[in-house]
Amino acid sequence: MAELWATLIWPVLWTAIKIVIIVGPLMLAIAYLTFVERKVIAAMHLRKGPNVVGPFGLLQPMADGLKLLLKETVVPSRANRSVFVIAPMITFILALVAWAVIPFGEGLVLANINVGILYLFAISSLGVYGIVMAGWASNSKYAFLGGLRSAAQMVSYEVSMGFVIITVLLCVGSLNLSDIVLAQKGSWGLFNWYVFPLLPMAVIFFVSTLAETNRHPFDLPEAEAELVSGYNVEYSSMTFALFFLGEYGNMILMSAMTSVLFLGGWLPPFDVVPLNWIPGPIWFALKIAACLFVFLWVRATLPRYRYDQLMRLGWKVFLPISLVAVVVVSGFLVASGMAPGAR
Amino acid sequence: MIFQALAFYLFALVAVGSAVMVISSRNPVHAVLFLILTFFNAAALFILMGAEFLGMILVIVYVGAVAVMFLFVVMMLDINFAELRQGFLRYLPIGAVVGLVLLAELLVVLGGWTFAPDASASVQSPAPGLEQVTNTRALGLLIYTHYLFLFQGAGIILLIAMIGAIVLTLRRREGARRQDIAAQVARRPADSVEVRKVPSGRGV
């Protein structure tokens, strides 16, 4: 019995506790991201934003969640019932499972696997299924059009994202996310982060994450002006809430991915006394918050792309640039003897 | 160990079950979704065997890209399910023969393992063991160092196939309006805007 406890039950229980420690704050962050988004955009529009429920409107996300929870779930009469219900669950679950490999600090990671970045890339490429299945199962024209647009868009931008990740991997020489962060540690502080040597790649990566999360200016799957709101028109109550939470969870995840790949993860900007007293997870959270602010800033500033322009940007601009960058970066690393495998 | 065995049987059972559902479900979209589930479980089996790189690539390439395109096409098609069922018995013998041949080949390969356990040692330049290098590096050594030319050859064949597909389907439509970004950006106000004094009541 004692052996069973030590070998099977306790590890499973301990992992479950760690999962709760990660998911709890994450859910809170998702809820308050919706609030911050409304506040930030309101400030940019010279409005006040939500300010009625609680002090400064701080209880607004709770009120919204309660409202969605108490509403009725409507399944359209000719919808494909099982797929209709599974689709929002897939979106939400995928937004959560990816956090298993994100390193919050030195050694602070749930699953320190060797192919962490591939795992993240795989999970983010699966996100399209929730949307496509929702669009198809709703048996509605607008939802279907939204789903199809999203399928084409997410597959297109994934390709250039993959090449950007390859350029980073060439510099690191490992697919482990903790190794990627540690490779950005150096005597120059923040100038060692890959955002500076690989600046064009960082920009391409960030724009691709906007497309991958269906955010402005690439939110064509839910273009409210033409598709009334795209793939989630027929959803109500908790099923809609799951899509919503999944989308915001994906935004945070993509910001975390940008921080790990280009902004040095949990590393402080300079390894000097007042800065390195602050623990790593807080630096990581600050970097994620900075990326999220840019997400919201873009939404408040830019108009929506036209669909053919979106495809052109993905296939004719980002893909050639990132392909050439892979060749240039690997050539430079080999020629200068800085390639990580050359040792 | 017991956990690994349990996980193996779970993934294997779901993989076989969903593979059966791929060919037996009535709705083609459901069939594709079951196919995706099968891919997933195959990837999980790869990971259980310690081939985590292959498992992740299976998910990225097959589930993340190929199956999306598959789903895309199947959803767009207007399929008559009853028509699809016709001729099932007529084609059954051919399918059964193909299946039997594949089964026989699998048996020969697996039988070889059983009868001659040291046969795998005679494989040309095998990958170094997992205890020496990581999975990704072992695969890289094999593909990009030992078998570079075969790999490049496979790449060229794929490239030719891609060019062929594009040549076969590309057609220039007359009268299609295309956006020329360079021309739009190069436009000056003087080229496109003309300011005129219009006398009232006369028009331009």
Image (spheres, coloured by chain):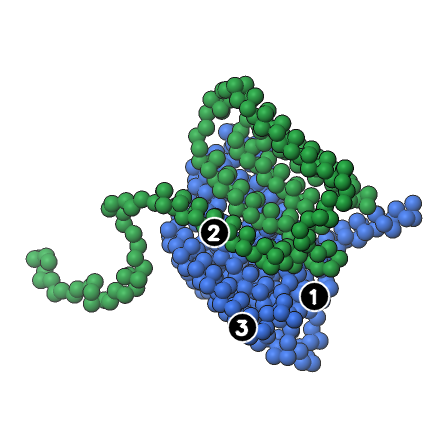
Chain colours: A blue, B green
Tell me the residue that label 2 is attached to: B156
The residue at 49%/42% (across/down) is: B69
Tell me the residue that label 3 is attached to: A335
Please name the amino acid that badge 1 sits on.
Answer: Gly
Pointers 3 and 1 in contact (C-beta within 8 Å): no
**In front of the other: label 3 or label 1?**
3
The residue at 72%/38% (across/down) is: B112
What chain letter is assigned to the residue under label 3?
A
Query: Could you tell whether B165 is left or right of A267 in the image?
Result: left
Is A136 located above or below residue A331 in the figure? above
**Residues packed near mark 3 inside 10 Å, few (<14), some (14 to 19) or many (20 plus):** few
Please name the amino acid that badge 2 sits on.
Answer: Ile
Please name the amino acid that badge 3 sits on.
Answer: Ala
Q: Earlier in the sequence, mark 3 or mark 1?
A: 1
Answer yes or no: is residue A127 visible. no
Tell me the residue that label 1 is attached to: A105
Is B111 located above or below residue B81 in the figure? below
Task: Work out how far the residue at label 2 is from the one at label 3, CA to CA, in angstroms.
Answer: 26 Å
Among the 4 quarters of the image, the one containing residue A227:
top left
What chain letter is assigned to the residue under label 1?
A
Among the 4 quarters of the image, the one containing residue B93:
top right
Pointers 1 and 2 in contact (C-beta within 8 Å): no
What chain letter is assigned to the residue under label 2?
B
Q: Secondary structure at mark 1?
A: loop
Q: Position of residue A278 (x, y in %)?
A: 69, 73
**In front of the other: label 1 or label 2?**
2
Task: Work out how far the residue at label 3 is from the one at label 1, CA to CA, in angstroms.
Answer: 33 Å
